[in-house]
């Protein structure tokens, strides 16, 4: 059985460092009373108070008189685009850490670091995971055209 080389020990130490730092971040966010992942993945949505038929009503639930503006309430609703962006961020983070650990091992062994220029298109394609979030933000920039 071969002995463990310096490069393998270095990769293990860095990998554990990444895992421990992510666990510490998770723990500090979990213990925070003013922050939650649910809130972070939600967005404000203005809703109009309506009856069962979809007609605007006042605060008591009676139909609005003509000319009176409907009551709007802003609620936090789950955002699929933010959830997809979070999953994409985690996936890209794992890819970067994985490739980084592989390059670190080769470097510690005294080998040449591989040419990553051909892999750059692979990393750029990861941006596609953020497309729904980008489109959502882009469309909200033109919300002033809505009636």
Image (tube, rainbow, N blue to C red):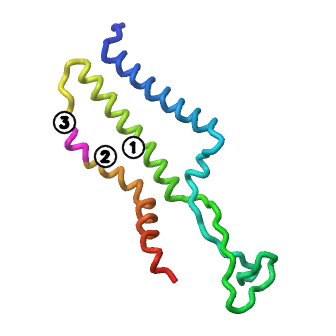
The residue lying toward the viewer, choosing from 43 and 83, is 43
State which tag comes first along the sequence, 3 or 2: 3
The answer to whether 138 is drawn above or below residue 53 in the figure is: above
- Where residue 130 sits, quadrant-wise, is bottom left
Q: How many marks?
A: 3
Question: What secondary structure prevails in the magenta region?
Answer: loop
**Residue corresponding to mark 3:** 115
State which tag comes first along the sequence, 1 or 2: 1
Question: Residue at coordinates 71% horizontally, 82% vertically from top-left?
Answer: 56
* Quadrant location of the N terminus in the rendered image: top left
The residue lying toward the viewer, choosing from 26 and 122, is 26
Query: Dot 2 lies on which element?
Result: helix
* Image-based side of 98 in relation to 117, left or right: right
Query: Dot 1 lies on which element?
Result: helix
**Residue corresponding to mark 1:** 92
Residue bounds of the magenta highlight: 115-120
């Amino acid at each position: 059985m071969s002995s463990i080389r310096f490069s393998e020990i270095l990769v293990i130490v860095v990998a554990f460092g990444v895992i421990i730092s992510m666990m510490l971040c998770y723990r500090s966010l979990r213990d925070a009373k003013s922050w939650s992942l649910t809130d972070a993945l939600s967005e404000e949505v203005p809703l109009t108070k309506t009856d069962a038929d979809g007609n605007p009503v006042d605060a008591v639930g009676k139909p609005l008189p003509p000319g009176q503006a409907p009551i709007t309430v802003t609620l936090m609703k789950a955002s699929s685009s933010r959830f997809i962006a979070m999953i994409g961020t985690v996936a890209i983070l794992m890819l970067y850490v994985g490739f980084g650990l592989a390059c670190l091992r080769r470097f510690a062994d005294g080998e040449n670091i591989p040419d990553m220029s051909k892999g750059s298109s692979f990393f750029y394609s990861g941006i596609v995971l953020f497309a729904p979030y980008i489109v959502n933000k882009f469309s909200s920039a033109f919300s002033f055209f809505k009636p």
